[in-house]
Amino acid sequence: MMPDNNDPTKDTQLSPLRWASRFAGGAALGAVLVALPLSYGSPLSLDSMQIARVGFVVLGCGVMAMIWGQALIDAVMESLGKTGL
């Protein structure tokens, strides 16, 4: 019988490609979260502090997605769905 890779309760080693894809998905989610205020007309100033904040959000979401995986992405998407955006 082959192991089920979709079972979130199993503690298995993930391949580097899987870690990279989780990070990329989380970083993309972070980019969406940063883009939401911009789509409503919030001004974007390109000072160093603003760039640092954007980088922190994007990298933070990427790292959190690497750790928690699909559960994080599902929780954030559910929260965004409840806002009515």
Image: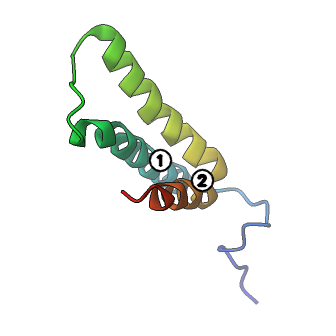
* Residue at 29 percent of width and 40 percent of height: 35
Residue most extreme to the top: 48
Quadrant for the N terminus, please: bottom right
Mark 2 falls on what kind of element? helix
Q: What is the x, y in percent for residue 38?
A: 24, 36
Q: Is residue 35 left or right of residue 28?
A: left
Q: Nearer the viewer, residue 54 or 12?
A: 54
* Residue at the disc numbered 1: 26
Q: What is the x, y in percent for residue 47?
A: 25, 10
Marks counted in the figure total 2
Q: Residues within 10 Å of mark 2 (few under 14, many from 20)?
A: some
Instruction: Relative to 1, say whether 40 is above or below.
Output: above
Q: CA distance from mark 2 to mark 1?
A: 9 Å
Residue 64 - label: none
* Residue at the disc numbered 2: 72
* Residue at 33 percent of width and 17 percent of height: 50
Q: Earlier in the sequence, mark 2 or mark 1?
A: 1
* Residue at 30 percent of width and 9 percent of height: 48
Q: Residues within 10 Å of mark 1 (few under 14, many from 20)?
A: many
Q: What is the x, y in percent for residue 25?
A: 44, 52
Q: Are marks 2 and 1 in contact (CB under 8 Å)?
A: yes
